[in-house]
Amino acid sequence: MNAAGGNGNNRNTSLEQDICIHIFTVSSAMVGVCLTVIGLIRVVITLGKADTLADDFLALDALLFLVACLLSYWALRSRGFSRMHHVERIADVIFIAAMIGMVGICALITYSMTLPAPPAH
């Protein structure tokens, strides 16, 4: 095909699908990571070592990763390139927001674990 024609569009479609696949796989893995860390934080809170809101924030972050995962799946299933591109962009923004949230939550976990334990009553 010509340089300005069909190959460029096929390459863009392939790139968009690759991005969707990466968002889909990483987002689903991050949902599992969030749920695992929530369980670990609940154990630490139960043992009385720390008290933090990080588990609540992680639950919200897990939902964001789940939404990004579902949107990327929807984009992969879309037949039209423009729809796939639009849905993939939304999934990408939500995924980046969830990753930024994860960094903030990690900072919160680190801060709350370094504080002295509250006195037992």
Image (cartoon, grey):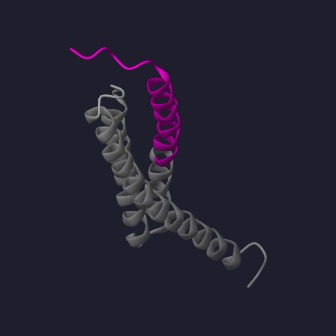
Q: In terms of depth relative to the viewer, which is nearer, 72 or 112? A: 112
Q: In terms of depth relative to the viewer, which is nearer, 46 or 88? A: 46
Q: In terms of depth relative to the viewer, which is nearer, 17 or 57? A: 57
Residue 11: image location, x then y, percent: 66, 73
Taking the image as shown, residue 96 lies to the left or right of residue 69, namely right
Q: Looking at this view, name the residue that lies furthest to the front.
A: 120
Residue at the image point whose x is 48% and y is 40% from the top: 102
Q: Which residues are magenta?
A: 95-121
Residue 67 visible (yes or no): no
On-image quarter of the C terminus: top left
Q: In terms of depth relative to the viewer, which is nearer, 19 or 108? A: 108
Residue 40: image location, x then y, percent: 35, 45
Taking the image as shown, residue 19 lies to the left or right of residue 94, namely right
Considering only vertical position in the picture, is 46 above or below 99? above
Considering only vertical position in the picture, is 64 above or below 76? above
Taking the image as shown, residue 44 lies to the left or right of residue 72, namely left
Q: Main secondary structure of the magenta part?
A: helix
Residue 14 visible (yes or no): yes
Residue at the image point whose x is 47% and y is 36% from the top: 101
Residue at the image point whose x is 75% and y is 72% from the top: 4
Q: Looking at this view, name the residue that lies furthest to the right.
A: 3
